[in-house]
Image (spheres, coloured by chain):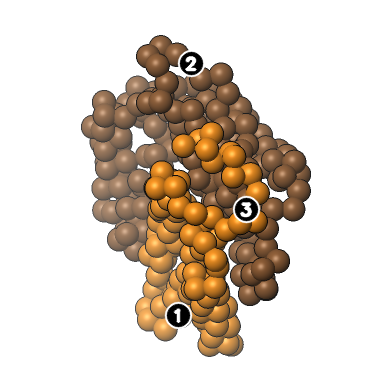
Chain colours: A brown, B orange
Amino acid sequence: MRLEARFKWLPTPFLSLLLFIVWLLLNNSVSTGHILLAVILAIVIPLATSPFRTKQPLIIKPGLALRHLMLVLYDIITANIEVAILILGPTKRLTPGFVKVPLDLTHTMPITILASTVSLTPGTVSAEVYPWHENLKKGEQPEQRFLLIHVLNLTDEQALIDTIKQRYEAPLKEIFQC
Amino acid sequence: MTEWIISILLLIGGSFVLIGSIGLVKMPDFFMRLHGPTKATTLGMAALLTAAIIFFSTSYEGMSVKEVLISLFLLLTAPISAYMMIKSAIHHKLESVERTKGKKNVEDAA
């Protein structure tokens, strides 16, 4: 895990890249003026706001991150079709359930990404991450964090936990190296 | 040809958004109702926005990719709003249907 970026003037490289792309998309043009302005904004805004932010792990394997993004997008499409079928089918046959998934991740940024992917993919919505800092005594470290998720149609609890851990959490651990 | 693609995408998007809304009406408790809008609607919107990109790129001058941003922001905000809603539902101790498994896990978290 690495919290500090390679260059001091570029504290969050991927946030800068995102700002650059968002600016160009907002203006819907790739003219020289807009590219120049986007570069300036992408450097100045992260620098100006970095004192307000808590340091988060940086993406160390961008190639893997891109591949994981593709996998998640594919899963969103298949999960959507699955949920659509479940919604249209008979409601009485659905067996909803709450499942807690033990987390290996420790930092807020990777946990947020995991919770969001879980919400967007296989028939699950993440409900709670616990225990959280505010609920613990001062200086106490949580031994094990859990992600509480609500499943629309729970068939095999252990299989679901394994899927989430292997398919979504393991790549995140490798991307952030934590 | 492009008209066909646009129409098919619009139909797919429209049906997914419709299915999401049907889920809102049909499901028996709050937690199950959340699944429709977070998932089905996201894909529906993505399909509608792709149709918009193709339509504006082919009918007026120049490319139009602003719609990608809408999809991006939807993908970022949909899980977070769902999370906020389900979190407050847990703190208000909303009832879930009888057959819900693992209710004990919720008490651990609250």
Tell me the residue at 50%/32% (across/down). A130
Question: Which residue is labeled 2 in the image?
Answer: A141
Q: Name the amino acid type tagged 2.
A: Gln
Is residue A97 in view from this perspective? yes
Q: Position of residue B97 (x, y in %)?
A: 57, 58
Tell me the residue at 45%/52% (across/down). B94
Q: Name the amino acid type tagged 3.
A: Thr
Q: Decide which of A125, B57 is in the foreground and name it.
A: A125
Q: Are marks 3 and 1 in contact (CB under 8 Å)?
A: no
- The quadrant of the picture occupied by the N terminus of chain B is bottom right
Real-space Cα separation, disc 1 to disc 2, in angstroms: 54 Å
Position of residue A14 in the picture relative to residue A69 (left or right): left
Residue A44: quarter of image:
top left
* 1 or 2: mark nearer the eye: 2
Q: Which mark is residue B100?
A: 3
Question: Which residue is labeled 1 in the image?
Answer: B55
Q: Decide which of A97, B42 is in the foreground and name it.
A: A97
Is residue A75 in view from this perspective? no
Q: Position of residue A157 (x, y in %)?
A: 72, 45
The vertical placement of A114 against B94, above or below, is: above
